[in-house]
Image: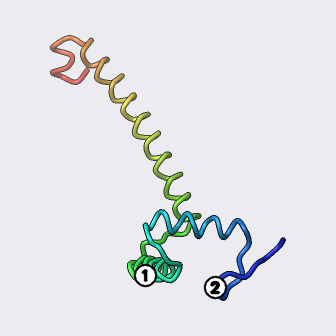
Amino acid sequence: MAEWIRKGYRADEETDKKIKELLRIYKLKSENDLFRAIVSDIYELKKSKALVPFEELEKRDTELKTALLEIGRLRGVLEEKEKGEEKKGFWARLFGK
């Protein structure tokens, strides 16, 4: 892969495109300002411990989906039980038969 020198560092074409896109996203004019903004963002994220490993996030997502499925199943069971209770007569409901 061809590399070229740009302002004291080496970057390939893909990296250069990403740098230009980041300049546009951050609405900055110079690469020095971009570097400062990126370092500041990374510093704040690490300091606040806002970064979560992907594996941990994926595990929690799976657990959440499993819990939601269980809630749905239990809701269905409860609705069926309530329908059965409605069909019973007054005295059967009163005395629990």
Q: Give the vertical position of 73 relative to 6 (above or below).
A: above
| Count of numbered circles in the view | 2
Which residue in the structure is indicated by mark 2?
7
Q: Amino acid at mark 1?
A: Ser
Residue lying at 57% horizontally and 67% vertically, measured from the top left: 20
Q: Nearer the viewer, residue 77 or 24?
A: 24
Number of the front mark, 1 or 2:
2
Res 72 → quadrant? top left
N-terminal of the two: label 1 or label 2?
A: 2
Percent across and percent down for residue 71 are 40, 40
Q: Residue furthest bottom?
A: 8
Q: In the drawing, what numbered circle is on residue 79?
A: none
Q: Give the vertical position of 90 relative to 60 (above or below).
A: above
Disc 1 from disc 2: Cα separation: 21 Å
Q: Give the vertical position of 79 relative to 2 (above or below).
A: above
Label 2 crowd (10 A; few <14 / some 14-19 / many >=20) = few
Q: Amino acid at mark 2?
A: Lys
Q: Secondary structure at mark 2?
A: loop
Q: In the drawing, what numbered circle is on residue 40?
A: 1
Residue lying at 79% horizontally and 76% vertically, measured from the top left: 3
Q: Nearer the viewer, residue 76 or 2?
A: 2
Percent across and percent down for residue 32 are 50, 83
Q: Secondary structure at mark 1?
A: helix
How was the colour assigned to the protein in this rendering?
Answer: rainbow
Residue lying at 36% horizontally and 22% vertically, measured from the top left: 80
Percent across and percent down for residue 35 are 51, 81
Label 1 crowd (10 A; few <14 / some 14-19 / many >=20) = few
Percent across and percent down for residue 18 are 61, 66
